[in-house]
């Protein structure tokens, strides 16, 4: 029978997961329960994905604001530090900032403008252009920024992040001075001790600062990269990928995820005889064209995945074939010709015109984005995503 449905992405409900729960067994049971209840058969090369949040919760990978403060105080006993390029987020950065402020006496907080790294705008590009400001060279004090742009609030959250972050620092008994600039080295006009809060550009920022004479350079990935007073930690990413848990704690990005995905794949094979691909996913890698926000605030889309998810798609652009190679065909003749071309395609189409316009991104980034959009970030209650047909093509029966 001819198939009429291709890729299907389903959110799978799971129990509320707590510290100490067996996440491997819970995910396996949730998929098997959904299979039985809804009559969906597990197939080879299905993809099962579980959000990083519940993996970290099961691991108990939490830390308190006081733990962050203790780590920062140990790294910066001088008491003064520059924080550069944090994202504008109450969920992602506010608790980190609170903890850092609790560990020092003064913070020079340098924000990028007109937006942060992931697209949250302090001001619009148009307003910046109207003011005649050059974002590549101009360093603005808080007073000068206010003089030029006033008190503008984020279009989605309604928060004035300059004011919010400054008051948050001061509430910890720490002095705050706000600077706005886009060259990381501008912070060296104020202090030689720096924490790079940027996510995807952090290694470049560290390199430039060290070359320019900074004395101490750490990133958020260096804070809580080891336990502090028995806290959670992430040896690779530190505070990167953390989320607000309570008013005094954060949930860190999960660690040791490879045994989790391998364990789920093994248990599903034992139960079904099918080879299922498994991944842990965080933020998807996509951009909102209206708010200009790039979703990826996690350090990676997927911290762990089974071997079959390595690599890039290897796909032919069907409309290219239809408009070029087989422009004189139609109906069944066109369908059959395209099917044969797909069956005979090279194992690596990179650089070939027939693949132009397909998506040149890693499979895990594409799948993670699909998973993030399917599960959402609110009350859907589906931290597990079950994808079928992703690796099928036009020839699949």
Image (tube, helix red, strand yellow):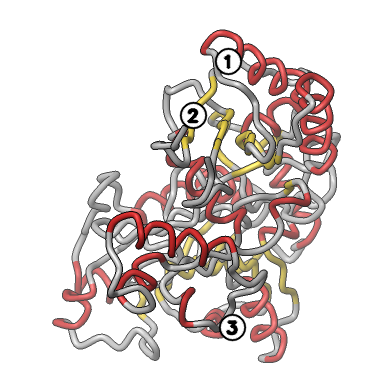
387 horizontally vs 227: left or right: left
| Residue underneath mark 1 | 34
The residue that disc 2 covers is 10
Whether residue 250 can be seen here:
no
Q: Earlier in the sequence, mark 2 or mark 1?
A: 2
Residue 118: percent from the left, percent from the top?
44, 62
Question: Is residue 274 depicted above or below 99 in this figure?
Answer: above
Q: Earlier in the sequence, mark 2 or mark 3?
A: 2
The residue under the point 35% across, 62% down is: 334
**Residue 229 location, quadrant:** top right
Task: State the image quarter where residue 263 is shown.
Answer: top right
Distance from disc 2 to disc 3, alpha carbons, whole Å, reads 49 Å
C-alpha separation, residue under disc 3 versus residue under disc 1: 56 Å
How far, Cα to Cα, is label 2 from label 1?
10 Å
Tag 2: Cα neighbours inside 10 Å, few (<14), some, or many (≥20)? some
Read off the residue under disc 3: 188
Q: Are marks 3 and 1 in contact (CB under 8 Å)?
A: no
């Amino acid at each position: 029978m001819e198939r009429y449905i291709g890729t299907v992405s389903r959110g799978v409900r799971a129990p509320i997961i707590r510290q100490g729960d067996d996440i491997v067994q819970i995910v396996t049971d949730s998929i098997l329960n959904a299979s039985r209840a809804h009559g969906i058969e597990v197939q080879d090369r299905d993809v099962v994905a579980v959000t990083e949040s519940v993996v970290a919760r099961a691991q108990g990978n939490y830390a308190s604001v006081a733990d962050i403060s203790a780590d920062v105080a140990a790294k910066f006993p001088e008491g003064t530090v520059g924080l550069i390029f944090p994202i504008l987020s109450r969920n992602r950065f506010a608790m980190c900032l609170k903890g850092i402020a609790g560990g020092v006496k003064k913070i020079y907080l340098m924000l990028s403008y007109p937006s942060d790294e992931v697209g949250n705008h302090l001001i619009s590009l148009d307003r910046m252009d109207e003011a005649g400001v050059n974002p590549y060279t101009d360093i603005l004090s808080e007073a000068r920024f206010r003089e030029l742009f006033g008190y503008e609030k984020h279009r989605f959250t309604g928060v004035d992040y300059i004011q919010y972050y400054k008051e948050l620092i001061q509430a910890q008994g720490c002095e705050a001075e706000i600077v706005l600039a886009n060259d990381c080295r501008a912070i060296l006009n104020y202090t030689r001790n720096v924490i790079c809060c940027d996510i995807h550009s952090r290694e470049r920022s560290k390199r430039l600062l060290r070359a320019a004479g900074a004395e101490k350079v750490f990133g958020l990935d260096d804070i809580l990269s080891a336990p502090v007073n028995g806290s959670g930690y992430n040896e690779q990413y530190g505070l990167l990928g953390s989320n607000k848990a309570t008013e005094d704690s954060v949930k860190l990005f999960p660690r040791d995820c490879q045994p989790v995905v391998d364990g789920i794949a093994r248990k599903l094979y034992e139960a079904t005889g099918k080879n299922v691909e498994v991944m842990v996913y965080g933020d998807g890698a996509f951009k909102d064209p209206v708010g200009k926000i790039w979703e990826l605030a996690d350090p990676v889309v997927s911290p762990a995945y089974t071997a079959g998810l390595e690599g890039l798609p290897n796909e032919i652009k069907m409309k290219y074939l239809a408009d070029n190679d087989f422009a004189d065909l139609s109906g069944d003749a066109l369908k059959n010709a395209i099917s044969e071309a797909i069956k005979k395609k090279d194992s690596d189409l990179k650089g070939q015109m027939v693949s132009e316009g397909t998506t040149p991104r890693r499979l895990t980034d594409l799948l993670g984005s699909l998973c993030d959009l399917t599960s959402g970030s609110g009350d859907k209650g589906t931290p597990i995503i079950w994808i079928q047909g992703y690796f099928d093509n036009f020839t699949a029966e």
